[in-house]
Amino acid sequence: MAINLSKGGNISLAKEAPGLKSMIVGLGWDVRATDGQGFDLDASAFMLGANKKCAKPEDFIFYNNKQSVCGSVTHTGDNRTGEGEGDDETILVELDKVPANIEQISFVVTIHEAQERGQNFGMVSSAYIRLVDKVNNKEIARFDLSEDASLDTAMIFADVYRHNGEWKFKAVAQGFQGGLPAMVSHFGL
Amino acid sequence: MDLLRGHRGKISALTTSQVIEVEILCRYKGKGEVDISCFCVDSDNKLSDDRYFVFYNQPKSPLGEIVKLGAQEANKERFRVELNRLPEFLKHVIFVASIDGEGDMSFLDSGYVLLTANGQELGRYVFKGKDFRQEKALIIIEFYRKDEWRFSVVGQGFNGGLSALLKYYGGEEETDTSASAHEPTPKTTAVPVPAPTPAPTPASTSTATTLSQNGQTASLKGVAPVNIALTYRRSPSVPKAELRLGCMVELKDGQKFMLQTLGSHLGHKDSAPYITAQQNSGQFDELTIYKPEQIKRLLLFTFVYLAPNFAKDFGAVVILKDKNGNSVRVPLLAPSPSQKFCAVATIDFDNKLNIKREECYFTNHQFADQHYKFNFNWV
């Protein structure tokens, strides 16, 4: 059963996906039907050390740096309009290949140039971000961005982190001001 | 509460009332006026029932669920919406503003939408011309069902104006080009609104008319072939049910035929009745009339196949289109829950095809024949 995360939820979902090995973060939205600048949503991942910061730019996985050096985290490509069915951007994570110095991975979603374009999630149709267990294709968590984060332009969606030798998942769903650049400095880059 | 563009939330978070008043004002600096209207669309985001288009020519919906409260001044409208009384199949209530005149929404001085219930202000969204660029029609705000009624402050629009907006919702704008298409016209209720400044569509002067009241008529010049298409949705309540299209026809020489998109009565193109029936894949049956001038009279019908009666959510529409692209649309608005045959329209020919809306339900073909007196030999 997938859990629908409410805003600010901060629940451990370890029971939902015991022994999570590999996962997909999927971001989807509808192409803008009205006239005006398109909606360009981006999914990104920050690979963090014990201090909850990125040690180097290579640990920030996004549309311009699609794979981590270790190969465990892969961004499958930038979608700039939302065209296509299902997930429009995905990030794959092979948890057993993540280097030992990485303690946590945080997943974020942002609207590209949200401020310049005067956009927020509520203006986008059917925008969501979700986490899927890649092994059995089960959806672990989903957040409805259009409905439940309508006035936000950026969000920290979720963290996966090491705990007693296994990976656990925590829903964060926390709105964030300033878009991707502010996220980058928040995570120490 | 100040509402912002993109704002969404539950109505129940604003009020316990299900009766909301919506006041919209657009102060326009350009030449012309801003028309404000309200309409409902179904789960496919389609305008399937024209009666739920509330504007100055049609000030309320059939049961008064939506009522226009009378314009107090130019560029301003007020509506009362009783959300809990709207039919289940209508999923969105959409409030739009469109410019009848020159310029675009960047010429707005300012505007607002104000939501109230029982005289209490629930929320207000204020907008300015600089929020827009070349849009000539805007979706201001919408109410929609998602578990419960919610609101979305949209503030987005279409450069192509109301016709582009309606096209997105599967509607057509009625254009009054051929001053005659309607008889001494009662009031026309087609997906309404006045023709705005003609868009620079290349050489297309075709007309599109919707017949939404029984007895209402329209004409096609009859440039053959004339295509008649039926579209509808599968209904979850009767998943196997299909709709089929057909006609009973009497030619000028007295010959009578019945054809339909089922079985072997599929007609002929090159010999009488000069009409063919084609069942295409999916919910899309067609008739084609090759020699309209041969027709004395014709009854266009649809019937339910593989189920005992009509479903209320078929959303069936029959569209007649001549070779020049002129079209007449007949939506079935009141499907009978107990019968399976629907007389859609009658057609005769005198230099043009004259189409009269019927939407009259019968138990079967034979009863319809008795009523329309083709007098087929039923065995």
Image (cartoon, rainbow, N blue to C red):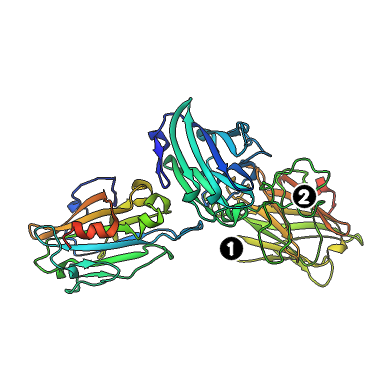
| Other residues around mark 1 within 10 Å, as few (<14) / some (14–19) / many (≥20) | few
Could you give the CA–CA distance between mark 1 and mark 2, rounded to whole angstroms? 27 Å
Q: Position of residue B83 (x, y in %)?
A: 51, 35
Asked if residue A37 can be seen in this view, the reply is: yes
Amino acid type of the residue tagged 1 in the rendering:
Gly
The image position of residue B103, as x and y in percent, is 60, 52
x and y percent of residue B161 in the render?
60, 53
Asked if residue B238 can be seen in this view, the reply is no
The residue tagged 2 is: B366
Residue drawn at the location 34% of the way across and 68% of the way down: A78
- Residue at point 66%, 38% (across, down): B56
Residue in the foreground of this view, choosing between A21 and A38: A38
Mark 1 residue element: loop
The mark lying in front, picked from 1 and 2, is: 1
Drawn side of residue B298 relative to residue B200, left or right: right
- Secondary structure found at label 2: helix
> Which quadrant holds the C terminus of chain A?
bottom left
Q: Amino acid at mark 2?
A: Gln
Residue B285: which quarter of the image?
bottom right
- In the foreground, B204 or A10: B204
Q: Is residue B10 above or below residue B252?
A: above
- In the image, which disc is placed on residue A62? none
**In screen coordinates, is A137 left or right of B113?**
left
